[in-house]
Image (cartoon, rainbow, N blue to C red):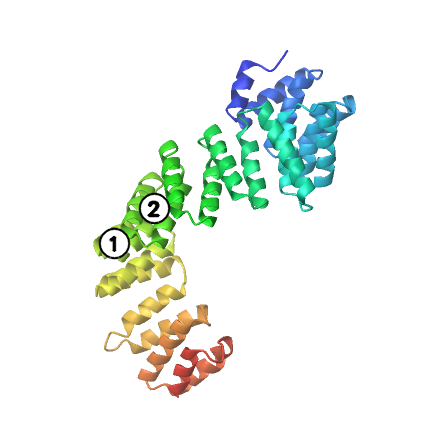
Amino acid sequence: MPITEQMKELLVAGQLKEVEPLLRSYAEQHEDDREVRTTWARVLLGLRQLDEAQGLVEALISEAPNDPDSLGLRALEHEMHGRLEEAKADYEASLALDSEQSNVLYNLGRLLVTSVDFDDAVAQKAEEYLKKALKLTPDHFQASFQLAALYTRLNRPEEAVEACAETIERNPMHIPSYLFLGEIFTLLGQTGDVIELYKAGLRVNPLAHAFRDELIRLYRVEERFEAAFEVAMEQADMRGACEDFMQMGELSLILGQTQSAEVSYVKAEDVSPKDWRPSYNLGELYRGLGLTEQAHEAYTRSLSLAETAEASNGLGLLSQEKEDGMEEAISRFQAALAIVPDSPVYLNNLALALDKAGRKEDIADTLQRVGPLFPPDDPTLANVKAML
């Protein structure tokens, strides 16, 4: 009995976890069906169930040592275990028996593209195998993607761009191709093309969050902060991760939109209630706005989640503004410096507070303890020494 239509549908859809039990059940009842057992072995390798796959592949080879499919499977198994020379030998042996196997051609070409012993001869072989795989299977987008990698390694960017574009044409949902092509455009200094590429990718696949991350990064580099904020809002709506709302908060502050920043950080708190960063950022925002009570509450929430130097320093800055808060400020600055003892900011804040409190000996003790962690010509170190 051949592979059933249900199995074929699951395999085409890439639902390996779902098809594996069906293949296992059938193979156990029909041990003489090599097609199903071969497919089952390939699925096991895809699921990285390597120990079980190894036994099945060895049995297939034992039964038919010159079967090209089985040799191709063993080559893949060797490769997944890092036995690259053995993999290369089995791929070549498989092709010697049947040179029209597009997946084996692809696997061998891919292996050569990343080969440590890469030279012109290896590159020529890799290109030959990958092009033949494409000729046999024109929609083999992975083969054209590997050609792009090959041409990049050979410093042939124009051909790499063409191969990457062909990959996207064959499979518009192939996210790595867009990112790879984006890197090539970046190397060529074509930032505008990178932006248009990721926009096009999002029109095809709105769930490709990596494209928005890259667009935000590019817009920030170009200081197009309003454009970055628009994409960040869309990312927060589509993905809704803590980092997305944090990004919105940062961009809001750059644009001078403090209310929007507050809303963003509050949403980040809601999304990740165990993450200390949103509360800390709220503390910084409120302190900058002169909202002392709200800032104190936010810093305290942050510290309840993680003992960080940042929140301790924030509370110290708040405390030193109070008439009777200098000792508490010193304690907070000491806690911050204990966590990050080589921080110029925390050393400077502590030294200033100690100087204001007239505690010169404590400044000297602090310098003796953390001074060796700083470069001898560090300006902060010189400023603190001047307080003695």
Q: Residue at x 37, y 43 (%)?
A: 195
Q: Is residue 292 left or right of residue 276?
A: left
Residue farthest to the bottom, as pictured:
388
Eye-nearest disc, 2 or 1: 1
Report whether residue 340 is seen.
yes
Against 106, residue 29 (above or below) is: above
Against 253, residue 28 (above or below) is: above
Quadrant of residue 236 within the rendered picture:
top left
Report whether residue 107 is seen.
no
Res 108 label: none
> For the residue marked with disc 1, what is the amino acid?
Glu
Q: Mark 2 sits on what residue?
A: 271
Residue in front for this viewpoint, 263 or 110:
110
Residue in front for this viewpoint, 161 or 89:
161
Q: Mark 1 sits on what residue?
A: 262
Quadrant of residue 23 within the rendered picture:
top right
Q: Residue at x 29, y 52 (%)?
A: 225
The N terminus appears in which quarter of the rendering?
top right
Q: Position of residue 319 (x, y in %)?
A: 28, 72
Label 1, secondary structure: give it: helix
Label 2, secondary structure: give it: helix
Q: Position of residue 136 (x, y in %)?
A: 60, 23
